[in-house]
Image (tube, grey):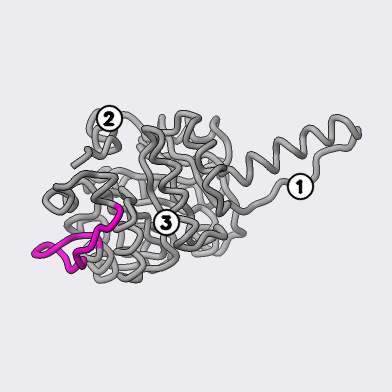
Amino acid sequence: MKKNKLREIIKSGKAIINGWLQIPNSFSAEVMAKQGWDSLTIDMQHGVIDYPNALQMLQAISTTETTPLARVNWNEPGQIMKILDAGCYGVICPMISNKEQAEKFVQACMYPPKGYRSFGPIRALMYAGADYGDHANEEILKIAMIETKEALDKLDDIMSTPGVDGIYIGPADLSLAVGEKPSFDKPESDPVYPVIMKILEHAKKNNIFAGLHNMTPEYAQKMIDKGFQFVTVGSEQRFMTSGGKEAVEKLKGKSKGVESKTY
């Protein structure tokens, strides 16, 4: 089976630089994949991407050395299994709030006896190799999102779940969980910042990696320096929006408006 390069990056102590895809288009996915990202995550939760789109995007990413990941829209076994069968090398699962949910997520990603994933890797066999079934349990990354109030009280329960490789923080939902407005790139004075640091410390304690969604490379670097080993920077939609807006404003002489607070 083709090795998951992301595991080697984590093992070496370095950080995975992850890109984010929200537009349901194979060409834009291919363009992003050519830019040198370690991984690209197809966002099937808040992006506008369905399974047929995701399949074509995975094919486009496969023309490069970039590792394909996906964020599913819920902890639903059928959806998790299907995107893995399509050749995804890791799954980010939202709203994991307790150990039971973490176990359900992990087991959906793994073949028996460790899990209950059904066997039928229709495209994964072509992408990963004929021995995919023998090694998929060890190569596929299982990443649980920490973003609910309940999860904050059960960090060790979730992070100690066998098979959980890492956690991922969505600052917007995490903000809502602690009574703040959703936003990203939290300054140290923000009430959400110490919560993010608390999650990071628990990940370190449980010997799994921590990931975070960021808006700027500068903030992502700051978080790498703090110990995050998986950082997302923006998305293709945001790059298109900010680049186009900047060009128009330079030519029309208009000042920048308020930047979007979404992915």
For label 2, the residue is 13
Give the Cα distance between marks 2 and 3: 24 Å
62 left or right of 12 in image: right
205 left or right of 221 in image: left
Report the front residue among 156 and 108: 108
For label 3, the residue is 71
For label 1, the residue is 258
Looking at the image, is 149 positioned above or below residue 57? below
Dot 1, crowdedness within 10 Å: few (<14), some or many (≥20)?
A: few
For badge 3, the amino acid type reads Arg
Looking at the image, is 102 positioned above or below residue 233? below
Q: In the structure shown, which secondary structural element does the residue marked by tag 1 occupy? A: loop
Could you tell me residue 223's position as x and y percent?
A: 45, 36
Dot 2, crowdedness within 10 Å: few (<14), some or many (≥20)?
A: few
Q: In the structure shown, which secondary structural element does the residue marked by tag 2 occupy? A: loop
Magenta span covers which residues? 109-123
Give the Cα distance between marks 1 and 2: 37 Å
